[in-house]
Image: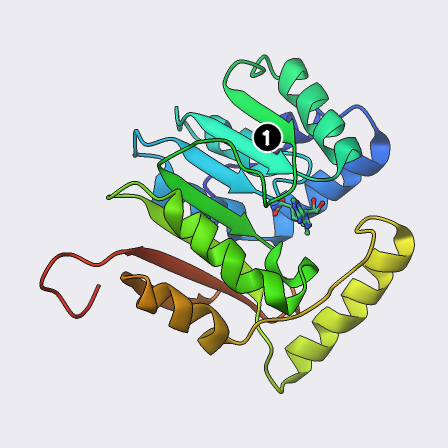
Amino acid sequence: MHLLDTAAREAIVAHYAQRRHRLYARWKLKTDPVYAATAALLRDSALPLLDIGCGIGLLGQYLHASGARVRYAGVDHDGFKIDTAQAAARHAGLERELDLRCADAATLPPVSGHVVLLDILHYLPADRHRALLQVATGHLAPDGLLVIRNVLREANWRFHATRVEEFFLRYSGWIPGGAQHYPSADELREPLEAAGLAVHIAPLRGRTPFNSYLLVARHRAPDSETP
Ligand SMILES: C[S@@+](CC[C@H](N)C(=O)[O-])C[C@H]1O[C@@H](n2cnc3c(N)ncnc32)[C@H](O)[C@@H]1O
């Protein structure tokens, strides 16, 4: 599923000054359905959005290109990626719309709205997952959505393909430290349900070979057992 056609995706790519970022952005926007899936969930909402581990800011760019006028705050602990994201936002004329900050996931701005974690959890050690899920839940507005895309730990070839990719990502220097712990579906579902959220998990792989899933959670309606 693409919300943006090739020309619109190329317009995003052109906001990145370095060739390697343009190649990365083009590949991600073309093959990975996560930006379209997230934009489809959030673009009609007026709630602000907190993007934890925002990388070079592709989601914020994608949301604006697809017509969302959401107030967006993105944080990432990699200063170089945030510099890149900020430069791209300036080039796109979105420096006021996209608030991009260098910060660890443990020190988040006081946003209450939707919360997004795209491909970040497995870079944190297992003992930080529960704490981050709790913090993310604390930033949800009553009608806010928690959107998590992550590879899940499962015994299948897609999971092994993911681990091979992560090996190269780590040694290329793109993700210093590399993957720490891949959660299982239950490791995500249980603490969120215990916090009163209704949780839906479904595969989201697009044209990638990776074992990726999309989790969408929201506060359970009073007196309801199901989403
Ligand atoms: C695979 S990238 C995903 C980037 C972005 N979410 C996307 O999908 O386009 C994972 C990002 O998580 C960031 N990250 C990892 N651990 C983090 C932490 N503890 N606090 C903030 N960001 C973190 C990395 O720097 C990296 O930019």
User: Which quadrant would residue 158 be assigned to in this image?
Assistant: bottom right
Please tell me which residue lies in front, 166 or 33: 166
Question: For disc 1, does the CB lie below 8 Å from ligand 1?
Answer: no
Please tell me which residue lies in front, 112 or 27: 112
Which amino acid type corresponds to the residue marked 1 in the rendered image? Ala
* Color theme of the render: rainbow
Q: Which residue is the extreme one toward the bottom?
A: 155
The residue lying at 56 percent from left, 30 percent from top is 61
The residue lying at 47 percent from left, 57 percent from top is 133
The answer to whether 20 is drawn above or below residue 204 in the figure is above
The percent coordinates of residue 90 (x first, y second) are: 65, 14
Q: Which residue is the extreme one toward the left?
A: 223
The percent coordinates of residue 129 (x first, y second) are: 56, 62
The percent coordinates of residue 222 (x first, y second) are: 12, 57
102 relative position to 212: left or right: right
Label 1: few (<14), some (14–19) or many (≥20) C-alpha neighbours in 10 Å: few
Tell me the quadrant of the picture where the C terminus can be found.
bottom left
The percent coordinates of residue 81 (x first, y second) are: 74, 35
Please tell me which residue lies in front, 169 or 109: 109
The answer to whether 102 is drawn above or below residue 114 in the figure is above
Q: Is residue 141 visible?
A: yes
Please tell me which residue lies in front, 47 or 26: 47
The answer to whether 193 is drawn above or below residue 133 in the figure is below
Q: Which residue matches tag 1?
A: 7
206 relative position to 111: left or right: right
77 relative position to 221: left or right: right
Q: Is residue 205 visible?
A: no
User: Which quadrant would residue 82 be assigned to in this image?
Assistant: top right
